[in-house]
Amino acid sequence: EVQLEESGGGLVQPGGSLRLSCAASGFTFSNYAMSWVRQAPGKGLEWVSAISGNGVSTYYADSVKGRFTISRDNSKNTLYLQMNSLRAEDTAVYYCAKGEGIAVAGKYYMDVWGKGTTVTVSS
Amino acid sequence: EIVMTQSPATLSVSPGERATLSCRASQSVSSNLAWYQQKPGQAPRLLIYGASTRATAIPARFSGSGSGTEFTLTISSLQSEDFAVYYCQQYNNWPRTFGQGTKVEIK
């Protein structure tokens, strides 16, 4: 069974840093692109970042570019999101999701999602 | 950035009735359009990809159509478990973008 489990969320002060992890199981992790999507309290879904299966290509939403870094360790089947210079507006549930589709063309949707981890940025 | 606009924001439907949700893209996304369902306190679940292909284990009452800039999700006969928020998302261009969601509520 394909499973994704996020961890690393918590309370952090504005300007602080946090690293989220997403442990994957049940599939060949290195073969699939992965994404992070967040949802602020009471709001809709916002795509944050994505990374190709080999980790070479990365993509970011403008709202996090220059502050967040996506990475992966295929030997550990783990996806990461390093979040720096955190702001109140980064408060959200962060989901990791597995990409499926035509990966070589960059056309992949998100077919499996984790349960999410909550990040709260507040003083 | 491609803007995805969903309508209506809220749809009130009686169980057993048909629900039609719309999603419009600000520029063509070809057929690279997915629909997700989200219930309170849960992660989103993939319903439709490629604009019209049902994901694994999704009931046949869910169907998707459209291409280019206009898309529709139809739920043919609403069941109690279908009351939720539905999001469309384009995966044709970077950055990926979601619609703001349509809440399907019990009438």
Image (cartoon, helix red, strand yellow):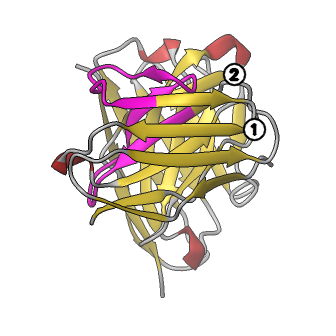
A85 falls in the magenta region? no
Amino acid at circle 2 = Gly
Tell which subunit mark 2 falls on. Answer: A
Left or right side of A20 for B2: right
Residue B45 is covered by the magenta coloring: yes
Horizontal side of residue A115 vs A18, given as left or right: left
The residue tagged with tag 1: helix, strand or loop?
loop
Which amino acid type is shown beneath numbered disc 1? Answer: Trp
Position of A104 relative to B28 (above/below): above
As drawn, the residue found furthest toward the bottom would be A123
Residue range (magenta): B34-63
Q: Quadrant of the C terminus of chain B?
A: bottom left
Q: Residue at x 54, y 33 (%)?
A: B34
Residue that appears at 33% across and 48% down: B43
Q: Nearer the viewer, residue A68 or B4?
A: B4
Tell me which chain the residue with mark 1 is part of: B
- x, y percent for residue B56: 32, 19
Horizontal and vertical percent position of residue B80: 17, 50
Mark 1 lies on residue: B94
Counting the numbered discs, the total is 2
| Label 2 secondary element | loop
Circle 1 Cα neighbour tier, 10 Å, few/some/many (<14 / 14–19 / ≥20): some
Residue carrying label 2: A106
